[in-house]
Amino acid sequence: MEHRVGTGGTSGGRGAAGRDRDGEGRARNARPRDGLGRPLPYGAEGVERQPEGVVRTPPDTVAEAQALLDAGKPFHAHEVFEDAWKSGPDGERALWRGLAQLAVGLTHAARGNLAGGARLLRRGAAAVSQWAGGSGEDRPYGLDLTGLARWARELAETVERTGTAVDAAAVAPRLR
């Protein structure tokens, strides 16, 4: 790959330090990623990335995240929840952040970072538990927050007890 001296970039958008940067020097990681969000070598075939900064309706957020979780792509589901967290009403940010923590906790548990995964699963469980308590239509966007918190705590215990990475698709939660 050719490096153009003095431009701070290369022909592939990678700076002198090998990091992807836009024209203003902000990080823009264009490396391909696998289904768990791990960076792959440049030129490798990765999975399609979730576009960043997409404003979705809450039902669309839940549906898209569920499809990604079912496909074993919790990292990508986390990005969908993160968009909702960053673009949603202030009063709901803790809910979406908690859901993002659950997805990234599953990501870490599937990658083999068991301690980090368990910690994030428990943190996410605590966050969504604060929103739980309603039933039927009283649950925000039909989310089974009590069930999600239970799932996260049980998965955290399992990965700590077994010391084994999980199959993200096989243990993916049901959001509703």
Image: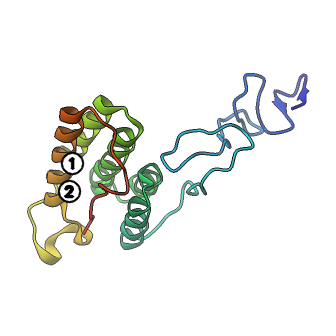
Q: Position of residue 127 (x, y in %)?
A: 21, 47
In front: 167, or 65?
A: 167
Q: Which residue is mark 1?
A: 152
Which residue type carries mark 1? Ala
What number of labels is visible?
Answer: 2
Which residue type carries mark 2? Leu
Disc 1 and disc 2: Cα gap in Å? 6 Å
Mark 1 neighbour density, 10 Å: few (under 14) some (14–19) many (20 or more): many
Q: Secondary structure at mark 1?
A: helix
Q: Position of residue 19 (x, y in %)?
A: 69, 30
In the figure, is residue 147 to the left or right of 115?
A: left
Q: Position of residue 82 (x, y in %)?
A: 42, 51
In the figure, is residue 76 to the left or right of 122?
A: right
Q: Residue at x 33, y 54 (%)?
A: 96
Q: Residue furthest bottom?
A: 137
Q: Secondary structure at mark 2?
A: helix
In front: 73, or 166?
A: 166
For the N terminus, the quadrant is top right
In front: 142, or 24?
A: 142
Q: Are circles 1 and 2 on residues that touch, CB within 8 Å? A: yes
Q: Position of residue 145 (x, y in %)?
A: 18, 60
Q: Residue 61 has which mark? A: none
Applied colour scheme: rainbow
Q: Residue at x 15, y 60 (%)?
A: 147
In the figure, is residue 56 to the left or right of 4?
A: left
Q: Residue at x 31, y 32 (%)?
A: 114
Q: Which residue is mark 2?
A: 148
In front: 56, or 153?
A: 153
